[in-house]
Image: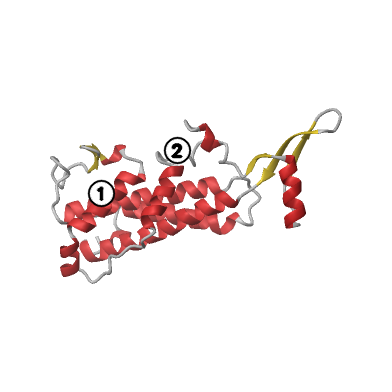
Amino acid sequence: MLYMMLPLDRHFDSGFGAVADSFRDAADALEDSRESASTLNAHLPTSFLYRHAIELYLKSAIIIFHRKLNVPYGGTPANGEPHIPDGTKWKPMYNIHGLLPLYRHFCSLFEDHADYLTNHTNTDWGFPAELGQWIDDIEATDSSSTFFRYPVTKDKAKDKVKSVFREDSYDALLSRVETNKKPTKTLLMLDQDNNVVETFSHDDNRAKEIVGTLKQVAELFSDCHAALVGELTGGA
């Protein structure tokens, strides 16, 4: 496509989609190497890159719709600074980092211009029924694009499950080992009499689940971006 060879500021969507592609490509590279890497908590940068790519893909789609179809952003013209409806107000898009308001506007644009898309494009614009739930799940984990970037956020309860090493129960650990018969990575803290006083176990199940959801949504929006650029902007 033409936009791949142009400077970002010359892209129809101001480069949002191309930068989203670069974040997704970087996330894919990290994810491919994560299983063989010895780095702990490698899911955090991978998750952040996918999550940021999703945000940029949504912003790209919104800009393309508004500019191509000359849809104003509330009281701001289509060629002005992009805005997103959030409640009863239109807020500057550059100040919006939550996926939910972006996704809602993304969906409304597809719904409002369904006839145009049917009559002027050859793409099936249907999305998986689960997409809304996937967005909700991501938003519940990281609503402000900070969860995967920082060790500490305003939500201490979430922060406790961010690491792949978590506080555990010694009795529960023994029960799992006896039941599953699988090796486990565990740190036992002992007192001076060799009594176990604290237990920390490796558990990356939630990390894998989050990365899987983020990757799936990023791939879906990457395909959507390619279709929008091909169908609505002539590859620009």
Q: Is residue 102 left or right of residue 88?
A: right
Residue sitting at 49 percent across and 57 percent down?
28
Residue displayed at 34% across by 49% down = 56
Mark 1 or 2: the one toward you: 1
Q: Residues within 10 Å of mark 2 (few under 14, many from 20)?
A: some
Report the amino acid beneath label 1.
His
Residue 156 in the figure: left or right of residue 74: right
Is residue 82 among what the camera can see? Answer: yes
Q: What distance separates the C-alpha of mark 1 from that of mark 2?
A: 22 Å
Image quadrant where residue 129 sits: bottom left
Nearer-the-camera pick, 128 or 67: 128
Amino acid type, mark 2:
Thr
Q: Quadrant of the C terminus?
A: bottom left
Viewport quadrant of the N terminus: bottom left
Say whether residue 3 is left or right of residue 42: left
Q: Residues within 10 Å of mark 1 (few under 14, many from 20)?
A: some
Say which residue label 1 marks: 105
User: Marks 1 and 2: CB-CB under 8 Å?
Assistant: no
Query: Where residue 144 appears, x then y in whole percent?
Result: 40, 38
Q: Can residue 182 be seen at all in this image of the molecule?
A: no
Relative image position of residue 179 (x, y in whole percent) = 74, 55
In terms of sequence position, does the residue under pointer 1 or pointer 2 come before the other?
1
Residue marked by disc 2: 146
What colouring style does the render use?
A: secondary structure
Residue 148 position in % (x across, y down): 49, 42
Q: Residue at x 45, y 49 (%)?
A: 49
Q: Secondary structure at mark 1?
A: helix
Question: Where does the image place residue 145, in percent across and percent down from the top left?
Answer: 42, 41
